[in-house]
Amino acid sequence: MAQPSITIRTPDDWHLHLRDGDMLKSVLPETSRHFARAIIMPNLVPPVVTKSDAEQYRDRILAVRPEGSDFKPLMTLYLTEGTDPDDLEDAYKSGVVTAAKLYPAGATTNSENGVRNFENIMPVLERMADIGMMMCVHGEVTDADIDIFDREKVFIDRVLDPLRTKLPELKVTMEHITTSDAVDYVASSKGPLAASITTHHLMINRNAILAGGIRPHYYCLPVAKRETHRLALRKAATSNDERYFLGTDSAPHLDENKIDPCGCAGIFTATNTMACLAQVFDDEGALDRLEAFACLNGPKHYGLAVNEGSMTLVKQDTPVEFPDVIKTGEGEVTVFDPMTPIYWDVKA
Ligand code: NCD
Ligand code: ZN
């Protein structure tokens, strides 16, 4: 009997960290092998804040694109309290950038330059609403008195919902949602709002990080929550609701920076994301919905055409082996271990 297989359009990744320099060169092929396009996160050091920064970063990415690849980086600007609305409009209208990213200051890796007082960016957000430019948001408050597991919900209540009430026409992507609260918020909202979900948040809960020993390679932000939240995310992702789509948040860090008394946040999933996702959708009896989640819903939300090419995934008889690490010019980066056998693999 032929092995089960599924053919879908070439997928896109709506949230990706590529970094720069040697790291960029080593991790880019892991994404360009499978994905046609990706929204590239601007949290470099220093961040990508102007049109000129975005053009230069795009060119550095294109310069190390593997031969024969036509992978397209969709660039973003990092919003700061000093962002110039005219430069942002020019960056968007000239096609250099696809979206702008809102990081609350201190929310995650390299977010020190993010926004402290949201009132100060209202003119920029008003301009974005006027020109139809997408705001991608890292939805967590950073107040020291808010428990890290509650930061997403508190952000929705205190920041996002009031902001969307003031500016209902602003297009918003809630990135890497991790809670049933975020799913409920998306489900109940009207207007241009959708959410990306990572592969790893569909596969692990917080026990992966903390039970039976501390495992830094499962630590990312927003941090994985309890099992009920993971189940809500799986339900949303496999629901065929077009407001949910894939954003891997694949975030490479050198192992030495992960395995540290104060290790940094980020899980590197680019290498095995599509295989893991096929397993998730198969386990949920929803393989027929994988294409909507990974290939169709994202372009629709961003107003872009779907990809012409295709990808075939095949189910193997025995678990597929993935590399443990990717070697970079700077050191090794550990690849996400899904903690469960993966039978699916990308074939073409
Ligand atoms: C990301 C990184 O390493 O840049 N880390 C993470 O845990 N996801 C930043 C981010 O997207 O929050
Ligand atoms: Zn990220």
Image (spheres, rainbow, N blue to C red):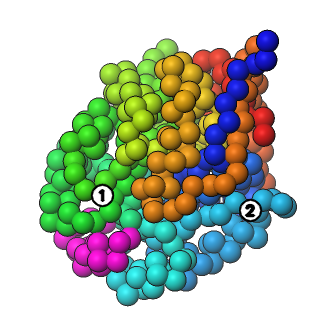
Q: Earlier in the sequence, mark 2 or mark 1?
A: 2
Residue 312 visible in image: yes
Q: Is residue 245 left or right of residue 107?
A: right
Residue 41 locus on image (x, y percent): 52, 60
Q: Is residue 72 left or right of residue 15?
A: right
- Label tally: 2
The stretch of residues the image draws in magenta is 115-133
| Residue at the image point whose x is 70% and y is 32% from the top | 313
| Residue at the image point whose x is 60% and y is 18% from the top | 340
The quadrant of the rendering that contains the C terminus is top right
Question: Mark 2: which amino acid?
Answer: Asp
Circle 1 packing at 10 Å, graded few (<14), some (14-19), many (20+), is some
The quadrant of the rendering that contains the N terminus is top right
Question: Mark 1: which amino acid?
Answer: Pro
Residue 248 locus on image (x, y percent): 54, 44
| Residue at the image point whose x is 41% and y is 80% from the top | 88
Residue 57 locus on image (x, y percent): 62, 72
Task: Identify residue for label 1.
Answer: 192
- Judge whether residue 316 is colored magenta: no
In which image quadrant can residue 85 be found? bottom left
Q: Is residue 276 above or below residue 61?
A: above
Q: Is residue 348 left or right of residue 88?
A: right
Name the main secondary structure of what is drawn in magenta: helix
In which image quadrant can residue 61 be found? bottom right
Task: Identify residue for label 2.
Answer: 70
- Judge whether residue 119 is colored magenta: yes
